[in-house]
Image (spheres, rainbow, N blue to C red):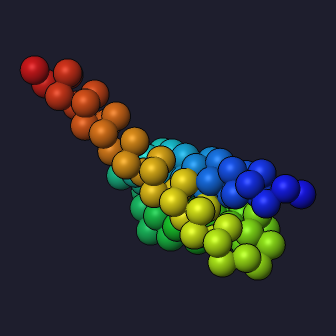
């Protein structure tokens, strides 16, 4: 595989994993706050999210540290986007 294609795939996969991680976190907080046993929701979600993200990054990286860093970059970029998006949404609802 072309090295640049692997780099692009790493960033995109990191972004997709970030999207998964933070969407499941959002869903968990919505459900877990009203659950009878919130510990199960939060602990289970945390373990699931962490395992999926770490496995995904490891699989896409193929053991190359550059690809791991690029995957983490994609993950962080999605986090920044989602924080800004939800902040913007909150501001339009309150004002």
Q: Is residue 25 above or below residue 45?
A: above
Residue 70 point in image, percent of width and height = 59, 62
- What quarter of the picture does the N terminus occupy? bottom right
Residue 87 point in image, percent of width and height = 25, 37
Tell me: 89 left or right of 24: left
Residue 29 point in image, percent of width and height = 40, 51
Q: Nearer the viewer, residue 48 or 81?
A: 81
Q: Nearer the viewer, residue 13 or 53?
A: 13
Tell me: 2 left or right of 38: right
The picture quadrant where one finds residue 37 is bottom left
Residue 86 point in image, percent of width and height = 32, 36
- What quarter of the picture does the C terminus occupy? top left
Q: Looking at the image, which residue is at 84% across and 56% down?
A: 2
- Does residue 75 appear in the picture of this structure? yes
Q: Looking at the image, which residue is at 45% across and 57% down?
A: 76
Tell me: 63 left or right of 67: right
């Amino acid at each position: 595989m072309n090295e640049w294609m692997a780099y692009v795939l790493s960033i995109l996969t990191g972004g997709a994993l970030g999207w998964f991680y933070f969407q499941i976190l959002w869903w968990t907080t919505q459900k877990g706050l009203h659950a009878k046993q919130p510990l199960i929701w939060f602990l289970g979600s945390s373990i699931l999210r962490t395992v999926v993200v770490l496995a995904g990054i490891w699989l896409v990286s193929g053991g190359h540290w550059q690809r791991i860093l690029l995957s983490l970059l994609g993950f962080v970029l999605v986090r920044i986007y989602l924080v800004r998006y939800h902040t913007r949404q909150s501001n339009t609802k309150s004002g």
